[in-house]
């Protein structure tokens, strides 16, 4: 499964990193970090750059798109809005964390649906004509919006993805991927991280010490 994480100047790093950590626990995840230009993109603290390995033009489809929020109150970048709109047509899931839902609203992804956002920025949705929901995670079809980074990396998030996978095949047992992801949640000491075509298994003791590579 290909997951595209959108980066832009002033994004909230935890919205990206927390969600990545959750999705990386599932098998067969290929992650790509996307920005208007390839290279380092600095977060809203000014001290946590993440590296975008691909440009908007490089990534034209993905199974999952993740749009993080920002402390910046500026209007969403129109080039990013157009990319989100185009990508949404290709996705199985379109996700936002915190105020990232304002990008989904601007792209028309939330038309007729309620959505979650950070409680202090509800106006970003209501000004765009989108109903604000107080739920931590809100599903509208293939769109998931999370109230913040704790919701995007919390226990309600990955199960929602697995439920959708099972809903697509009514009457069938959960897929092998869903079962393995469930085991990863129950036993968080072991993670499978997939990137650049290679899988890496990491083990941690309870105290956080790396136990094996």
Image (cartoon, rainbow, N blue to C red):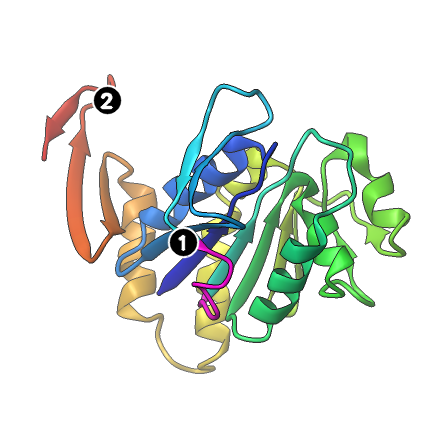
Q: Quadrant of the C terminus?
A: top left
- Secondary structure mostly seen in the magenta stretch: loop
Residue 72 pos. (x, y %)? 71, 31
Secondary structure type for disc 2: loop
Residue drawn at 44 percent across, 72 percent down: 166
- How much space separates mark 2 and mark 1, taking CA atoms? 35 Å
Residue 142 pos. (x, y %)? 60, 68
Secondary structure type for disc 1: strand
Which residue is most to the left?
Answer: 212
Residue drawn at 82 percent across, 43 percent down: 124
Q: Disc 2 designates what residue?
A: 206
Q: How crowded is mark 1: few (under 14 residues within 10 Å), some or many (20 or more)?
A: some
Range shown magenta: 55-63
Q: Earlier in the sequence, mark 2 or mark 1?
A: 1
Q: Disc 1 designates what residue?
A: 54
Q: In this view, does 189 lie above or below 196?
A: above
Residue 46 pos. (x, y %)? 55, 21
Residue 187, located in which quarter of the rendered image?
A: top left
Residue drawn at 32 percent across, 71 percent down: 175
Residue 52, located in which quarter of the rendered image?
A: top left
């Amino acid at each position: 499964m290909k997951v595209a994480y959108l980066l832009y100047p002033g994004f909230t790093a935890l919205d990206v990193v927390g969600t990545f950590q959750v999705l990386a626990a599932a098998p067969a995840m290929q992650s790509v970090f996307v920005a208007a230009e390839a290279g380092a993109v600095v977060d809203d603290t000014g001290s946590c750059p993440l590296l975008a390995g691909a440009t908007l033009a490089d990534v034209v489809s993905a199974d999952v798109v993740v749009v993080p929020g920002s402390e910046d109150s500026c209007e969403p970048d129109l080039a990013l809005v157009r990319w989100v709109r185009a990508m949404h047509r290709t996705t199985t899931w379109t996700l936002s964390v915190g105020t990232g839902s304002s990008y989904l609203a601007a792209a028309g992804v939330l038309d007729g649906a309620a959505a979650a956002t950070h409680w202090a920025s509800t106006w970003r949705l209501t000004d765009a004509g989108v109903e604000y929901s107080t739920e931590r995670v809100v599903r509208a079809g293939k769109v998931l919006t999370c109230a913040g980074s704790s919701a995007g990396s919390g226990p309600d998030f990955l199960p929602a993805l697995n439920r959708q996978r099972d809903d697509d095949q009514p009457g069938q047992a959960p897929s092998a991927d869903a079962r393995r992801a469930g085991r990863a949640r129950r036993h968080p000491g072991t993670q499978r991280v997939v990137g650049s075509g290679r899988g890496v298994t990491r083990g941690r003791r309870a105290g956080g010490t790396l136990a094996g590579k």
